[in-house]
Structure formats: structure tokens, C-alpha cells
Amino acid sequence: MEQIAAPTPVAVLMATYNGEPYLSQQLDSLLSQTYQQWTLYIHDDGSTDKTVEICQTYARQHPNIIILDYESQGGAMANFLSLLQRVEASYYLFCDQDDVWLREKIALQMERMATEEREHPGQPIVVYSDLAVVDADLQEIAPSFLAYQGIRPEFLQTFAELGAANLTTGCTMLFNRGAKALTQIPAPRAAMHDAWVTLSTARAGGILALVHQPLVRYRQHGHNTLGAVSQSRLTPAYRVRHFLSLAQANLGHYRMLRALGYGSWLKFMFYKIKYRYRLRSAQ
């Protein structure tokens, strides 16, 4: 497979599929970034709307937007990882087609990356941030995705602890070449691309660094591959109604961990129970 060397330090990877309604807003938010040393790589996964036409229009007008043409990957996870496999850069960001990035997103994350690399030279590093949860019209639902979902990053720092829950959201991630080098592709046991990179980094003792402020408007529009669920909705009744989907999510997460050498199902359950106990104790 031909490797593409990015002409800039940062490669932004966007996997698209039928993203016509919101794609232009996301592309405009990228073009408005205060940090401009990036190249955007787009691969479409077989859209039937005007997604490809929109991407082509932007690519004609902006030389740092490049459309890659290869076979369909059959889903968001495989599509993102296929881009990561093909592009060589110093740093990578995943970019969803339907969000909006704050103008300082890349700049603030690159500043944090530089700090972490000075303190931990040669280490694989993932920098991630909080998000603001918004509706289809960008009206705010919650100022903090982490608080909205009841996620406490301070309890999810080691590979063992990450058995309890997903920590990072792909559209907030900036990671270095060292983190990419640890990420096996293809990834038949991966549940999602963001978790796969994060877990691979944590397994090797890499750094997971949080920028606390929300840097993305995380749009909820009813067709998200994954979405935000308020902590207040995660009641026992909700868990009963959604037992099958929650069980499938847990199984997918465990299979991913197991592929990385995590250990037994009992260990997985121990850390999930421990995490929930720590959450209750912290309230």
C-alpha cells in the first residue's frame, strides 16, 4: 500500500458518508483554525448524496484539502483507520463530518502536545479535550460532554482502568507518530477507531493528556454513529430497556481489550465495578 507523506506537520483525517447537511460547516471551521499547518485527507465511504461534490469543491479551492480515492471500507471505524494507515505525518487528528471545531482547537492541542513531548520525550501521546454537546442547529445542550455523560478522566488513566469505560472521543484527539506506530491496522477486534488508538497507547504506558475546555461543538442530530447520552438518563430502567445494546457495547469493548492482552472477563468486570464505586463516592 502506497504511503502518502503529508506536506505539513499535522494530518487531519476525515471519513465521510452521506454528510451533506453539515459538512460545509465543519470544513469551514477547519479553514478558520488559528493553526494552519495542517493537511486534510478525506475518504468517502460510498455516499449517495452530495458529500463527494462538496468535498471536491473545497479541494479545488484549497490545496491543503486532499481527497483519497480507494475502495469503500464499509463503516466509520474502518474508514478512519484506512486513512491513518495510508498517511504519514508527525501528528494526526480525527475529524467527524458533522461537528464544528472552535478556532483555537488545533493550536491549543498542539501547545499541549509540545508540553507533553518536552516532559515525556519519545513517548506515544494522545491529547484529547472536552466537547460542548449541541443540537442539529448548534444550540447548546450541555457545556461539557464529560460532565453530561458522567465521565471522570482522573479514574481512567491506566490500561487496566480503561477497561471500565471509553475515555476519548475521536473528534477531540490529537496524537503523535509514536501513538500511531502502536496502533495495529487492520484491527479486526477494534470497536471504534478512537478507542483502539487510545487503548493501544495506554497499553504501552503512553501519555493520555486532557485539555479540559470544550474545543468541539459535538452535534447531535439523530444519525450519529455514536452519540451523547446524559448521565441522568443512565437509570436502572434505562439500562433494562437498552440491555442488549449496552451488552453489545461492553462485549465490543472487552474484545478490543482482550486483543491487546488485557486479561480475563473477571478483571474487566472488577474495574467496571471499581469505577462505578469511585463515581458514586466522588458525588
Image: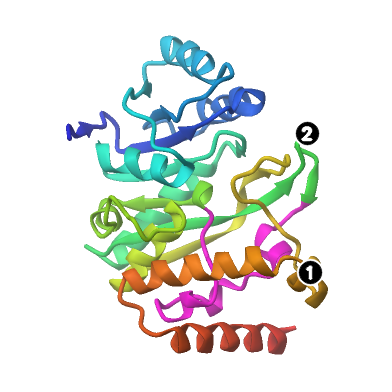
Rendering quarter of residue 282: bottom right
- Pick whichever, 277 or 116, lies toward us: 277
Q: Earlier in the sequence, mark 2 or mark 1?
A: 2
- Label 1 sits on a secondary structure element that is helix
**Residue 256: assigned label:** none
Q: Disc 2 marks which residue?
A: 137
Q: Position of residue 71 (x, y in %)?
A: 33, 28
192 left or right of 149 in image: left
Q: Looking at the image, how many numbered discs can be counted on the residues? A: 2
Q: What's the residue type where badge 2 is placed?
A: Asp
Q: Which amino acid lies under the numbered mark 1 shown in the image of this protein?
A: Tyr
Q: Which residues are magenta?
A: 142-169
In the image, 43 versus 45, the foreground residue is 45
Residue at numbered disc 1: 238
Quadrant into which the C terminus falls: bottom right
Decide whether residue 107 is among the magenta residues: no
Helix, strand or loop for disc 2 = loop
